Amino acid sequence: MKPRGEVFVDDNPVGRIPPLTRIEVVPGRHKLTIRNPGSRPYEVSFEVAAGQRITFAHTFVAQPPPKADFWRDLRKRFGS
């Protein structure tokens, strides 16, 4: 994962990437969430069998700043 992020499995915190590179979960259905400030969370549901390994890769892209409204901001500034 690039850049770093806080990792959650089934909404429980499990660490930070990096340095976290491996997470062990019990067989069954799970939800992986990775949060990075300034980006939308990466969320994926997956099902894992006993002894199975799954790899996830994701690159966070910064969210563009909210589009400014020139006229609204001008009216706020000058009280119209």
Image: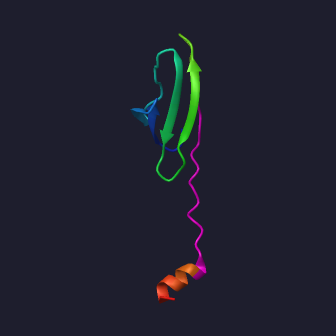
Comparing 50 with 71, the one in front is 71
**Residue 76 visible from this viewpoint:** yes
Residue at (54%, 48%) from the top-left corner?
40
Comparing 10 with 4, the one in front is 10
x and y, in percent, of residue 72 in the image: 56, 79
Measured along the vertical axis of the image, is residue 60 above or below residue 16? Answer: below
The quarter in which the N terminus is drawn is top right
x and y, in percent, of residue 9 in the image: 46, 29
Q: Quadrant of residue 15?
A: top left
Q: Quadrant of residue 16?
A: top left
Q: Is 49 left, or right, of 11 in this rendering?
A: right
Q: Main SS of the magenta segment? A: loop
The residue segment tinted magenta is 56-71
Measured along the vertical axis of the image, is residue 5 above or below residue 46? Answer: below
Comparing 40 with 16, the one in front is 40
Task: Tell me if residue 55 is in the magenta stretch.
Answer: no
x and y, in percent, of residue 17 in the image: 46, 36
Residue at (56%, 46%) from the top-left corner?
60
* Colour convention of the picture: rainbow
**Residue 18 visible from this viewpoint:** no
Residue at (46%, 41%) from the top-left corner?
5
Residue at (49%, 82%) from the top-left corner?
76
Q: Is 70 left, or right, of 27 in this rendering?
A: right
Residue lying farthest top? 50
x and y, in percent, of residue 45 in the image: 57, 29
Q: Is 16 left, or right, of 53 in this rendering?
A: left
Task: Tell me if residue 68 is in the magenta stretch.
Answer: yes
The mark tally for this picture is 0
